[in-house]
């Protein structure tokens, strides 16, 4: 990795870190949709595992649709529209991931003349991975403690 590439990569990571509060707030709000659902704690982790293996938004949303359709996991994923909402957050042009990726790209474009499409894809992938990780943590907390309102407070304070 040459010096310019390293500077670019560091700028990308810093721009992504700048979006973490919004990612965590959204994950907290989205996890609250599962209050009262009968979802196993590893189901969201399984989606995160797919994300890490595939590095593809389309593969992840396909896996969520699969979960929505299954007889065993479907009811939990359909609870309060949770699965469809998460898919929207990931793949919709006005969803969380697209909005935060736009902010990342704007920061990079302010520093560099040109931002490649590969960097835009990397930003979306990383933001999705963070979102799913924080979603998993928030759901785990709510399911274990039954303190769902703590997620609301963390969402509002951030």
Image (cartoon, rainbow, N blue to C red):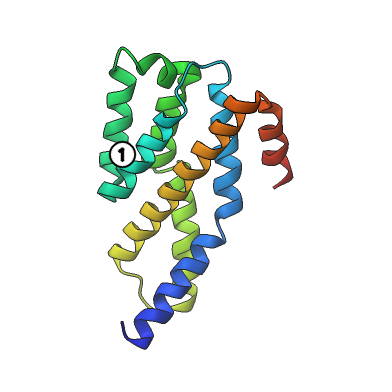
Front residue (pair 140, 13):
140
The residue depicted at 67 percent of the width and 40 percent of the height is: 155
Is residue 98 in sight in this rendering?
no
**At numbered mark 1, what does the secondary structure look like: helix, strand or loop?**
helix
- Pick the quarter of the image with the N terminus: bottom left
Of 64 and 145, the residue lying toward us: 145
Q: Residue 157 in the image: x percent, y percent?
A: 74, 44
Residue lying at 49% horizontally and 74% vertically, measured from the top left: 110
Q: Is residue 72 visible?
A: yes
Identity of the residue drawn at 48% across and 65% down: 106
Q: Percent x, y for residue 87? A: 38, 33
In the displayed structure, 19 sits above or below 58; it is: below
Side of 60 where 81 appears, left or right: right
Q: Percent position (x, y) of residue 99?
A: 48, 49
Residue in the image at 37% along x and 85% along y: 4
Q: Position of residue 70 (x, y in %)?
A: 29, 17
Quadrant hosting residue 156:
top right
Task: Name the residue carrying label 1.
Answer: 60
Single out the residue that lies furthest toward the bottom: 3
Quadrant position of residue 138: top right
Residue 76 relative to residue 153: left or right:
left
In the displayed structure, would residue 15 be above or below residue 156?
A: below
Above or below: residue 72 compared with residue 46:
above
Determine crowd level at label 1: few under 14, some 14-19, many 20+ residues with C-alpha closer than 10 A: many
């Amino acid at each position: 990795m040459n010096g310019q590439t390293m500077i670019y990569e560091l700028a990308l990571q810093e721009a992504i870190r700048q979006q973490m509060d919004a990612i965590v707030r959204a994950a907290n709000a989205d996890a609250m949709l599962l209050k009262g659902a009968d979802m196993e704690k590893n189901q969201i982790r399984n989606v995160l595992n797919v994300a890490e293996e595939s590095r593809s938004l389309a593969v992840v949303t396909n896996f969520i649709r699969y979960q929505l359709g299954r007889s065993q996991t479907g009811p939990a994923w359909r609870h309060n529209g949770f699965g469809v909402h998460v898919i929207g957050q990931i793949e919709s042009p006005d969803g969380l991931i697209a909005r935060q990726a736009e902010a990342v790209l704007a920061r990079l474009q302010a520093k560099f003349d040109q931002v490649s499409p590969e960097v835009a894809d990397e930003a979306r992938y990383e933001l999705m991975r963070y979102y799913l990780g924080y979603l998993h943590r928030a759901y785990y907390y709510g399911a274990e403690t039954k303190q769902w309102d703590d997620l609301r407070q963390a969402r509002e304070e951030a």
